[in-house]
Amino acid sequence: MVQRSSDFMIIGIIVLVAISVSVVVTSGDGDDVVFVFVFQSAAPSTFDSSTPTEAPTLTPSYMPTYAPTLSPQGVLKSLYDSTNGPSWTNVWDFKSGQSYCEYHGITCDYTEQITEINLEDNGLRGTIPSEVRLLSSLSRFDLDDNSITGTIPSEIGMLSSLTRLDIDNNSITGTIPSEVGKLSSLTLLILDNNLITGTIPSEMRTLPSLTRLYLEDNSIAGTLPTELCTLTNTLIWYDEDEISCSCIDSSYREGTPCN
């Protein structure tokens, strides 16, 4: 005979602490926005098996965050917005349906990755957005002869394919970020005729591909890293009354290797 009992003992309970649901939405401008919904429960710190336990209450929490990456068109939109795009000489029309690879000053490879941005003398007014770091195939970035202000974003050091950075004849302030030293493919760095201050970061000694460096007509002071002075194929333009190089005669504005 089987005896049934009406007494039950709670052996264990699985307590739900948090559930996270992410939804990615792409806007018409090409920006990806992530909507994160987090459901949390206030789990008790102690558990008494002799006391009936109610199911945990789920409380939704809404936290919109931007996705870690943007589409190439989204990055261009960031650049356009941060430099007063509607006032450019040659504007970009994001609503025309035109491929971003056909925009003025943009060059793409066969996979539609942006390889060059050349907006020289195009009426740009504003700052360089940090989102440009996402253009991993960018080899040329020219914004010279505009009215760029603000600082050089440290994220520029993430552009591992960059060979040419030309931002002369603007109103850029701040210092040269040390992250520039990560640009191992860089051959041409043109920073002259700005309002850049501070010293030359020692990290720039790790630029083995550099052939031209333009620093003059700023407020940069200090000493050029010896490793830069001794690069055989590198020519350096600098203000000799503010910058010294241990192995270059100060009368030379074009760097020559040490003897």
Image (tube, rainbow, N blue to C red):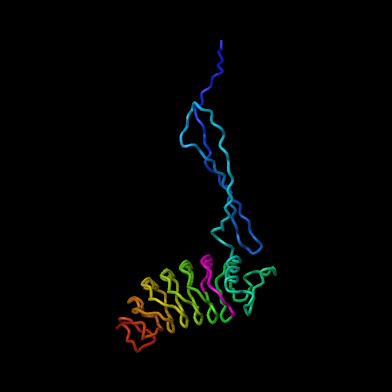
Say which of 12 and 162 sits in front.
12
Image location (x, y in percent) of residue 73:
61, 66
Tell whether position 135 is magenta: yes
Residue displayed at 54% across by 41% down: 41
Quick one: quadrant of the C terminus? bottom left
**Viewed as shown, does residue 202 lie left or right of 161?**
left
Image location (x, y in percent) of residue 112:
60, 67
Say which of 8 and 141 sits in front.
8
User: Going by the picture, which residue comes out furthest to the top?
Assistant: 1
Image location (x, y in percent) of residue 71:
59, 63
Residue displayed at 60% across by 59% down: 32
From which residue to which does the magenta span run?
Answer: 122-140
Quick one: quadrant of the N terminus? top right
Tell whether position 131 is magenta: yes
Image location (x, y in percent) of residue 215:
42, 81
Residue displayed at 63% across by 58% down: 26
